[in-house]
Image (cartoon, helix red, strand yellow):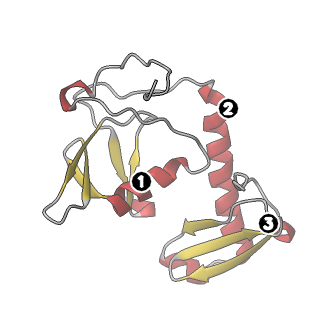
Amino acid sequence: MRLKRPRHASLEEVRISREGEWAIIEYADPTISSVRLRVGSEIKKMTDAAILALFNLTVDAQDEISAQSENRVIEVPLGRPQIKYFEEGDQWVPRAQVLRCHLEDDEKGKLVVYVDDEKFDLQQFGRMLTTYAGWGMRIYFVDDDAVAEEPTVEVKDPED
């Protein structure tokens, strides 16, 4: 069963624990996904209420973006950065909802993803994608030279 997207919560609805700089927010309702929220070293001084307030701000921001999307996405123009480093979260984040990527493998056969001129292993790339946790995504695999072009999509079973 796919779990429901986390939502704005009260202290009575969640249990908060800590692992280093991370807050783990678990809902009493088992059908709602738990969340790992990177808070940073200040987590040691924060109450559960303060952590939950920070988490609720994050949920509210995601809900606002979702409400504005109307199934339209923004793609950063060629030559402009698609990603930025988010220092508070110590991670790269997309600047818009479309990422043009190039895939390679390293000498050990492990996936390497390039976005702009930045190189990510699968774990780093996955962490960047958590910016949109709770959303859906479509992936198009196109020729390396065609990542800036919108492909024509033909809906059919490839074996037909």
Could you say where residue 153 lies in the image, as x and y percent from the top left? Answer: 43, 19
Local secondary structure at mark 1? helix
Residue at (31%, 35%) from the top-left corner? Answer: 100
Real-space Cα separation, disc 2 to disc 3, in angstroms: 25 Å
Distance from disc 1 to disc 2, alpha carbons, whole Å, reads: 21 Å
Q: Which mark is residue 128?
A: 1
Mark 3 belongs to which amino acid?
A: Pro
Pointer 3 local density, CA inside 10 Å: few below 14, some 14–19, many at least 20? few
Which residue carries the number 2 mark?
67
Label 3, on which residue? 30
Counting residues from the N terminus, which is met first, the one under dot 3 or under dot 1? 3
Q: Residue furthest front?
A: 160
> Image quadrant for the N terminus?
bottom right
Q: Position of residue 67 (x, y in %)?
A: 67, 32
- Residues tagged 2 and 3 counted as in contact (Cβ below 8 A): no
User: Which mark is in front, 1 or 2?
Assistant: 1
Residue drawn at x 34%, y 43% as measured from the top left: 83
Name the N-terminal-most of marks 1 and 2. 2
Mark 2: give few (<14), some (14-19) or many (20+) Cα within 10 Å: few
